[in-house]
Image (cartoon, grey):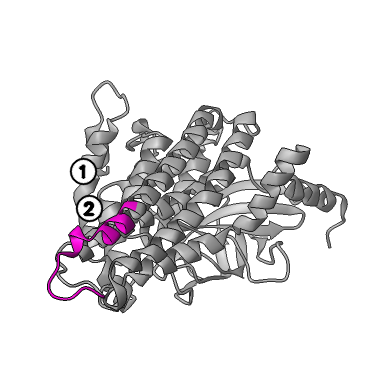
């Protein structure tokens, strides 16, 4: 049983988010204290992940009856912004884990979902191995019958969080079917490599995961669909995107924090003779004022988009596969993305106007804010989403039309 579940009242109602937040605040502070050193040394965040695990962070969305905190999405994403301010690697590390839990909330088989909830409330952490480095968006990872069990073979990349995980969620092909499954991270035949070489978000463990003859029992098969079916839901598309946006909002907040910490003790300003208090310089005040406005704006946009998703969550947890609110949540996440990306990158660049060359010290690692934001911005290209939003406004074209069309074509094509 995790520590958060002990906050649940005897009547079984959801514990107040303030109580959960109070318990997590010291953990976030501890994570923040070592963030610069981890960045400078490229020290993987095993200890911070363990601190979160011990605090029951991974069970925030798990229902109370299964030992979790059972909090809502608005509360969850506000906590994720706080965590991102401490270290933006951490929300990305647990992104696949929370998406896994959200998928189980949608499962109509309560007993099957309950098994996974119990593992999560016991501290288990899930990573994901979905994408492949290939010339198309298909999958070459194969699931084949091997006696009473299955055999998994293939190589995945951008396998975020798998270095830290107890279980790995993967997608594989079984003939004409797309299969989602889970395997223990330490199972025979599983290899996890720390070969992610992005210049930002360097500690997320987003490298290679390889499966060589990994045995998978039937009970660990999560979902089976045909290749002709639409691969995901607007609800989950919005959910995944909002993790990135919450992380960016946390980075913008960290920029304001670090700007203040840098400026307050300084007594020297470029182009001004003698000893002066930089914190009283009107130009510096203006820059920091702009940074605070950008931070406020990003957090407000994320909060607004999350509230739309939160409104859709009752339908999702009731097992509804398609709903108008899912499309609205996807649209709102894409709209917020356009502004949050630009404003966070502006803040991460403008930060250097408060200190000149001294702000570029590698010891301070202030450049990490821009590098992390830039890598997050590249994950889901905003320019594609911007065009799709324009097509929606002008022509009423659904945001997921390209994927639905591709799925329809694939359904009509014979598979080898």
Whether residue 163 appears in this view of the structure is no
Q: On screen, 200 above or below 7?
A: below
| Coordinates of residue 300 in the picture (x, y in percent) | 41, 41
Marks 2 and 1 close (CB-CB < 8 Å): yes
> Which residue does the image show at 64% across and 30% down from the upper left?
324
| Neighbours of disc 1 within 10 Å: few (<14), some (14-19), many (20+) | some
Name the one closer to the observer, 409 or 180: 409
Query: Which residue is nearer to you in this view: 73 or 369?
Result: 369
Q: Is residue 279 magenta?
A: yes
> Could you tell me which residue is drawn at 76 percent across and 50 percent down?
402
Residue at position x 21%, y 41% in the image: 22
Q: Quadrant of residue 322?
A: top right
Q: Residue at x 54, y 36 (%)?
A: 106
Cα distance, mark 2 to mark 1? Answer: 8 Å
Q: Is residue 247 left or right of residue 253?
A: right
Question: Which quadrant, please, contains the N terminus?
Answer: top left
Which residue is disc 1 drawn over? 23
Answer above or below: position of 273 versus 324: below
Q: Which mark is residue 27?
A: 2
Instruction: Tell me, yes or no, whether the highlighted magenta stretch contains residue 13.
Output: no
409 and 154: which is toward the camera: 409
Residue furthest to the left in view is 275
Q: Viewed as shown, does residue 165 lie left or right of 17?
A: right
Q: Position of residue 410 (x, y in %)?
A: 82, 53
Viewer-side residue, 110 vs 146: 110
Instruction: Using a 10 Å C-alpha cutoff, classify the residue at mark 2 as few (fewer than 14 neighbours), some (14 to 19) or many (20 or more).
Output: many
Q: Which residues are magenta?
A: 271-289
Q: Left or right: where does residue 164 sit relative to residue 223?
A: left
Q: Is residue 71 left or right of residue 47?
A: right
In this rendering, the answer to whether 295 lies above or below 317 is below
Give residue 2's position: percent from left, percent from top: 27, 44
């Amino acid at each position: 049983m995790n520590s958060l579940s002990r906050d649940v009242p005897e009547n079984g109602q959801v514990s107040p988010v303030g109580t959960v937040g109070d318990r997590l605040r010291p953990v976030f502070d501890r994570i923040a204290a070592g963030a610069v050193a981890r960045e400078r040394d490229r020290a993987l965040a095993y200890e911070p992940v363990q601190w979160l695990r011990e605090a029951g962070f991974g069970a925030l969305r798990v229902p109370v009856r299964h030992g979790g905190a059972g909090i809502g999405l608005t509360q969850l994403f506000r906590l994720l912004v706080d965590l991102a301010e401490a270290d933006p690697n951490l929300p990305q590390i647990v992104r696949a884990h929370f998406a896994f839990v959200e998928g189980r909330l949608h499962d109509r088989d309560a007993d099957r979902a309950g098994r996974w909830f119990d593992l999560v409330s016991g501290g288990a952490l899930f990573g994901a191995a979905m994408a492949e480095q290939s010339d198309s968006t298909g999958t070459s990872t194969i699931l084949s019958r091997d006696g009473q069990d299955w055999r998994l073979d293939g190589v995945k990349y951008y396998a975020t969080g798998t270095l830290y995980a107890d279980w790995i969620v993967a997608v594989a092909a079984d003939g004409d079917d797309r299969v989602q499954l889970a395997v223990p991270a330490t199972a025979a035949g599983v290899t996890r490599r720390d070969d992610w070489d992005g210049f930002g978000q360097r500690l997320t463990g987003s490298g290679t995961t390889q499966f060589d003859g990994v045995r998978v029992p039937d009970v660990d098969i999560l979902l089976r669909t045909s290749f002709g079916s639409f691969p995901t839901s607007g609800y989950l598309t919005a959910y995944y995107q909002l993790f990135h946006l919450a992380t960016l909002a946390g980075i913008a907040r960290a920029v304001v924090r670090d700007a203040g910490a840098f400026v307050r003790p300084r007594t020297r300003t470029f182009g001004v003779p003698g000893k002066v208090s930089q914190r009283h310089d009107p130009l510096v005040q203006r820059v920091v004022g702009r940074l605070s406005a950008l931070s406020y704006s990003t957090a407000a946009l994320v909060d607004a988009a999350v509230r739309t998703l939160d409104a859709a969550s009752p339908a999702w947890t009731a097992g509804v596969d398609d709903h108008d609110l899912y499309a609205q949540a996807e649209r709102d996440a894409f709209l917020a993305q356009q502004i949050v990306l630009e404003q966070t990158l502006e803040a991460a660049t403008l930060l250097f106007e408060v200190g000149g060359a001294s702000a570029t010290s590698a010891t301070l690692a202030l450049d990490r804010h821009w590098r992390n934001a830039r890598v997050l911005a590249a994950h889901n290209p905003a320019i594609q989403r911007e065009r799709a939003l324009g097509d929606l406004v002008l022509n009423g074209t659904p945001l997921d039309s390209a994927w639905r069309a591709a799925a329809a074509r694939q359904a009509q094509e014979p598979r080898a």
